[in-house]
Amino acid sequence: MIPWILLLLLLVVYSIALPSIFKRAGISAVLGAIPLVNLLFLIKLLKRPWYYFILLFAPGVNILMLIILNVELGICFLQRSVTEQWKFGALPWYALMELALKKKDAKYIGPRDWQDKKKSRGREWGEAILFAVIAASVIRTFVFEAFTIPTPSMEGSMLVGDYLFVSKVSYGPKSPQTPISLPFVHNNMPASMAPSYVDWFSMPYFRLPGLGAVERYDPVVFNFPPGDTIIIDPVLSTFDYYQRRRLMGINQAKGVANFVENEDFYLKQADKELKQQFGLRQRPLDKREHYIKRCIGLPGDKLSIVDGEVFINDEAIETPSEVQFNYRYTLKKISFQSKMEEKLGLTKLDVAATQGKEGVAAFTLGEIEELKAMDITDTIYRLPHDNQKGSLDIFPNSALEPYSSWDIDNFGPVLLPAKGLNIPLSIQNIEMYERAITHFEGHELRVEGDKIFIDNEEVNSYTFNLNYYWMMGDNRHNSLDSRFWGFVPETHVVGKAVFTWFSKANENDQGPGNGGIRWDRMFRTVK
């Protein structure tokens, strides 16, 4: 609340102080008393461009703009010492009232005139950098932002080392919820785990209108839903804290059966160990890790997966041509391995393991047809994932039936929440919707016996306030996606990947001879 109180107080100070200040500058005192109008005329008094007024409504940028306007206002009244400029920049509440009430003899002389003066090199560079930071921040926040693909979860359509432009206007740009942060840095200071933002000054979620809504098969960038809590470690911070905590609890319990009998105890033990070894930290929504996946399920859909094929509302949907699965194969000759890799363009990220004539690799359905046409394999079949059943790895991470019998290729059905959708609640399905109700929609929920309480009221149904999406990677057997952690709320959607502007392969990932710039992928639209 403190940031909002300070901002409101500053607006009040403007309405009190600016009438007197405007009068000395030859502007009607009445205009200084009208909120927002006084800011517009303040910009005019400072002889600054009209678009400064628009920048005052850009979260994050507006704080910097207010500091600039306040400092320049002091300069207009000969308040030009270092101390005075710091006062107007850091303590405008005091400096403005002092100028209006105590320094009535301070005359308006106008902003500095650089027309016949040469600016120092430092000042020229400083102003150029400041303008560039403001312009780039506005574009990055509200128009588009550059992202890179760090993992192979979208292999088939997007490769590790692809650099993408992500459109913020496609679904509507979100205003920053942590506006005070280091420019061009997402959540950590460079080469550090120290936060790059101030989380005590926060703003509520707000999204401007976009060009459209998320559609099925869209490549979507979003804030990682389980990323509200992180392990303070450069590597572990990018993964699912809840999954790692659960796995540690299962290991401590020496098995899933023992773990579910006293789940709260083992989770607390895992938390204690993680805090001692690494430390834990909460992250605001807009500073959670960025993930990119393909939207498969839309709000209100009933989704299920049977043998790797996705069904929406009981009808099979088309599998994108870029989707790939892991297959085990046996070659007729060991020498055919290199022939297969060369012909299909397989890399180290595609080939998981080889031993003699046998191997495991990720193939698209089209590549499987090519492989069969080459007639170099004795056997080839899609890898099963039966070992995931009952492991609590699969959403909703519950030992109850039917959830315990699900795996990444056989899953559901799941009803995706939609804004305004009312569903009956039960002891069974509350496992699936608990996180949406509590973490994403901000309610308190508890279960006592066979009764469910939301905000201390017993309920048997719930109406959702947000839309939710189901995201899956194109590399279906190598993707941490909704099958593991569930729904993506609309509040977490960042933008749509639109085109690849640069791509560079790393030989450590792709294999010898596969490194360097991928010229054929540059300036290609993302499908």
Image: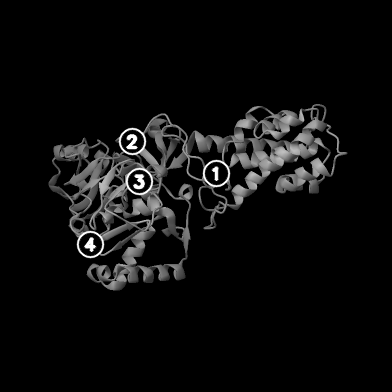
Q: Quadrant of residue 471?
A: top left
Q: Is residue 46 visible?
A: no
Extreme residue toward the left, this view? 378
For residue 54, the mark is: none
- Give the spatial CA distance, label 1 vs label 4: 43 Å
Closer to viewer: mark 3 or mark 2 = 3
Tell me the residue at 63%/42% (across/down): 63
Label 2: which residue? 218
Q: Residues within 10 Å of mark 4 (few under 14, many from 20)?
A: some
Q: Are marks 3 and 1 in contact (CB under 8 Å)?
A: no
For the residue pair 492 and 2, the one nearer the viewer reads as 2
Q: Are marks 4 and 2 in contact (CB under 8 Å)?
A: no
Q: Residues within 10 Å of mark 3 (few under 14, many from 20)?
A: many
Label 4: which residue? 399
Of the numbered discs 2 and 1, the one sitting upstream in the chain is: 1
Closer to viewer: mark 3 or mark 1 = 3
Tell me the residue at 73%/40% (across/down): 16
Q: Is residue 420 above or below residue 26?
A: below
The picture places residue 348, in percent across and down from the top left corner, at: 31, 49
Q: Is residue 253 left or right of residue 184?
A: left
Q: Is residue 518 visible?
A: yes
Q: Is residue 188 left or right of residue 517?
A: right
What's under tag 3, amino acid-wise? Answer: Val
For residue 488, the mark is: 3
The picture places residue 75, in percent across and down from the top left corner, at: 79, 38
Label 1: which residue? 184
Q: Secondary structure at mark 4?
A: loop
- Give the spatial CA distance, label 2 vs label 1: 26 Å
The picture places residue 328, in percent across and down from the top left corner, at: 18, 51
For the residue pair 110 and 425, the one nearer the viewer reads as 425
Of the numbered discs 4 and 3, the one sitting upstream in the chain is: 4
- Give the spatial CA distance, label 3 vs label 1: 25 Å
